[in-house]
Amino acid sequence: MPNILQLLPMLEPDEMVYVQGIVKDMNDTQAQQFASVYMNRRKDTTMILVATVIGFFGVAGVQRFLTNQTGMGLLYLFTLGFCFIGTIIDLVNFRAIALEYNVGVAQQSALLVKSIS
């Protein structure tokens, strides 16, 4: 089983557990390919936090656009982040937003690597 901590040291703990479950059946080459693809596609929690703060003081919904939630992004944009309440909730839950996006990206990356091999 490849050591994902060495391949992707920047992962959050919950994200690390999920990714370890994905790569447990991969050989070293597949795990390295997965790490390369995943590292380029994932969103860092700090970036989501900064985008949410930008949404609080500027353009609401940036964090939703970054995580491919276009409908929610437009809703936040036109309602000023649900009158700031949705943006405040996102400030509290920015890690969950990033994790949800990164789980989807991990699944897509795993499918891509397995289809290539």
Image (cartoon, grey):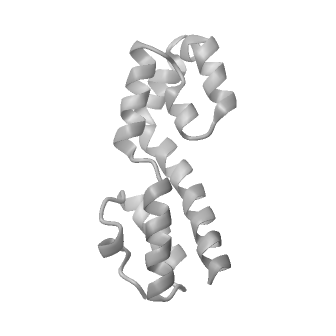
> Percent position (x, y) of residue 36?
44, 67
For residue 53, side relative to residue 96 (left or right): left
Look at the image and tell me in which quarter the C terminus lies. Answer: bottom right
Look at the image and tell me in which quarter the N terminus lies. Answer: bottom left
From the viewer's side, name the closer residue of 64 and 96: 64
> Percent position (x, y) of residue 82?
59, 15
In this rendering, is residue 72 above or below 112?
A: above
In this rendering, is residue 42 above or below 73?
A: below
Give the residue drawn at x 45%, y 20%: 55
From the viewer's side, name the closer residue of 85 and 11: 11
> How many numbered marks does the figure carry?
0
Give the residue drawn at x 44%, y 87%: 28
Residue 107 sits in which quadrant? Answer: bottom right
Residue lying farthest to the front in this orientation: 116
For residue 17, side relative to residue 25 (left or right): left
Residue 2 sits in which quadrant? Answer: bottom left
Give the residue drawn at x 47%, y 85%: 29
